[in-house]
Image (cartoon, helix red, strand yellow):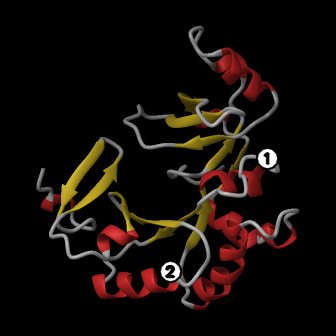
Amino acid sequence: MYPTPRPHDLLWGLRPEHLPQEAPAWARAALGGHVPVVVRRAPVESGWVAVGIRGVAREQRHAAWMRVSEIRRLVSPQAVARAGRWRSHAQPQWSALRALNQLAPRLDALGLAWGVTGSLGFELASGIAAAHPDSDLDLSLRASHQLPRDWARTLCRLLDEAPGRIDLQLETPYGAVALREWASEAPRVLLKTQDGPLLVRDPWQLQQVAA
């Protein structure tokens, strides 16, 4: 029995024959090669999970749905971080990998539930080439309780010391907000929820929705 899938988790088990007839051929081919799908945010019925299929080309992205009962393996961004496979990656000079090597021990020392997402997280979890030398480093941080905005600014400074472009999303119980946005002076921030984006004053208090 697997835990409830969360956004950015990678799932194995969706097969080409599970896709509707109108699905693109490249998506069927990807699943035929046992490529995992990525959990995305979208409204779903009970027993289902919204997922995205990645193709070889950057523009090849297809939204799909998967039965929870079809899940054969689940890898979370946090599991990718714990595995530490970037340390033996064939391209250690990539800025995203150098940033990860620099940040990992510091994030671990802070006791944060952080994980690797995006193309690099996909590649580290699956072994399927997806990242490239100019790939950003995408991170997620599970934050069940409100984080002070001053703390967010301190974490931003930590990220700024690392090479390359780094995007960190704070995963609250109601959705995700960009760390840099929460660290800003903006009175309202964009919260990505299962039902779409919302402007809120506090991403940890859904009743404070502003628009």
User: Residue 72 in the image: x percent, y percent?
Assistant: 73, 41
Residue type at numbered disc 1: Ala
Picture residue at 61% right of the left edge, 30% below the top: 60
**Which numbered dot is residue 160?**
2
Q: Are marks 2 and 1 in contact (CB under 8 Å)?
A: no
Left or right: 200 as drawn, with respect to 165: left
132 or 103, which lies in front? Answer: 132
- Element carrying mark 1: loop
**Which numbered dot is residue 129?**
1
User: Residue 6 in the image: x percent, y percent?
Assistant: 51, 52
Tell me which numbered mark, 2 or 1, is placed earlier along the sequence: 1
Residue type at numbered disc 2: Asp
Picture residue at 87% right of the left edge, 69% below the top: 88
Q: Most extreme residue toward the top, as rendered?
A: 21
Left or right: 145 as drawn, with respect to 132: left
Picture residue at 60% right of the left edge, 69% below the top: 164
Q: Most extreme residue toward the bottom, as rendered?
A: 109
User: Residue 120 in the image: x percent, y percent?
Assistant: 68, 57
Vertical position of residue 111 compared to residue 89: above or below: below
* Crowding at mark 1 (Cα within 10 Å: few <14, some 14-19, many 20+): few
- Element carrying mark 2: helix
Count up the numbered dots: 2
Answer with the quarter of the image where residue 21 lies: top right
* Crowding at mark 2 (Cα within 10 Å: few <14, some 14-19, many 20+): few
Vertical position of residue 147 compared to residue 210: above or below: below
**Which tag is nearer the camera, tag 2 or tag 1?**
2
Vertical position of residue 27 compared to residue 191: above or below: above
